[in-house]
Image: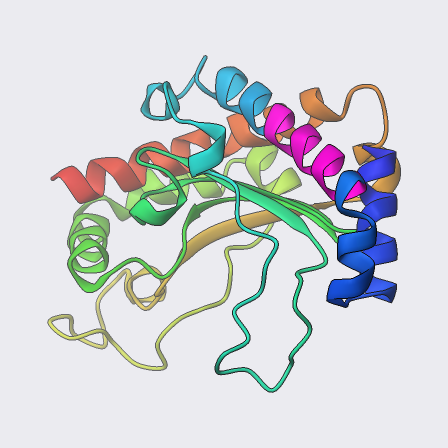
Amino acid sequence: MDKVLEFLKELAANNNREWFQDNKKWYNESREKMIFLTDVLINEIGKFDPAVRGVLAKDSMFRIFRDVRFSKDKRPYKTNFGSFICKGGRKSMNPGYYFHLEPGGCFIGGGIYMPPAESLRAIRNFMAEHADEYRKIIEDPEFKKEFPEMYDDKLKTAPKGFPKDHEHIDLLRYKSFIFSKTFNDSVVTSDNYVQEMVSAFHRLYPVNRFLYQAMDA
């Protein structure tokens, strides 16, 4: 993936349409490598998480083109490649697995980010009754070694329908249920980077399984 990271580094330094058009072949080659990597990860994750089996890479990858209509930042392109692998594709708002390639900022993640109101309500209701099961997953020493903290995106007070002194209010206040792990560029360009990512995703699988149980309850 070294040539992909090199492309992204050059794109960051030349974020304009003229440079992009002049290097369209390099972009297409980099994109094809990302599609291939996404396919490989879908197949590997599918070995332990049946929810992602049959998901297509094209439905998982994010576009490199930025929506600048309502942004002061008019740079036309993102300076990263990313894919979110989950049942129904990245637009489905389901729990899944994310990987992000960017020079000096590579990371993987998993869980569910800003779920719609109905899903969030279902997760909180389920969490209120099964918090001990969830804590057992995220407080496991091997899990915490890779994912020490959950993404800190939460309400300042209790969500509607729950008392402020609920015994699990610390979990119920969250608006997203996300964990992430950074990778050095040297890991991403090594021979075993796929195994490194799959191992981390495998560790995250119980979180996604719990979230699916909550949404289906």
Whether residue 131 is visible? yes
Q: Is residue 6 placed above or below 167 in the rendered structure?
A: above
Q: Is residue 197 left or right of residue 153?
A: right
Q: Is residue 146 placed above or below 120 in the rendered structure?
A: above
Which of 187/76 is in front?
Answer: 76
Which quarter shows the C terminus?
A: top left
* Residue closest to the far top: 47
Q: Is residue 188 magenta?
A: no
| Colouring style | rainbow
Quadrant housing residue 121: bottom left
Q: Main secondary structure of the magenta part?
A: helix
Which percent across, then down, holds residue 105? 76, 54
Whether residue 104 is visible? no
Q: Say which residue appears at 49% left-offset and 79% top-offset.
A: 69
Quadrant housing residue 163: bottom left
Q: Is residue 108 placed above or below 167 in the rendered structure?
A: above
Which of 10/140 is in front?
Answer: 10
Q: Which residues are magenta?
A: 26-37
Which quarter shows the N terminus?
A: top right
Q: Say which residue appears at 45% left-offset and 68% top-offset.
A: 153
Q: Is residue 202 left or right of residue 121?
A: right
Which percent across, then down, holds residue 150? 50, 55
Q: Say which residue appears at 37% left-offset and 38% top-offset.
A: 89
- Image label count: 0
Quadrant housing residue 50: top left
Which of 15/98 is in front?
Answer: 15
Which percent across, then down, holds residue 117? 20, 64
Q: Is residue 133 left or right of residue 124?
A: right
Q: Is residue 31 magenta?
A: yes
Which percent across, then down, holds residue 185? 84, 42
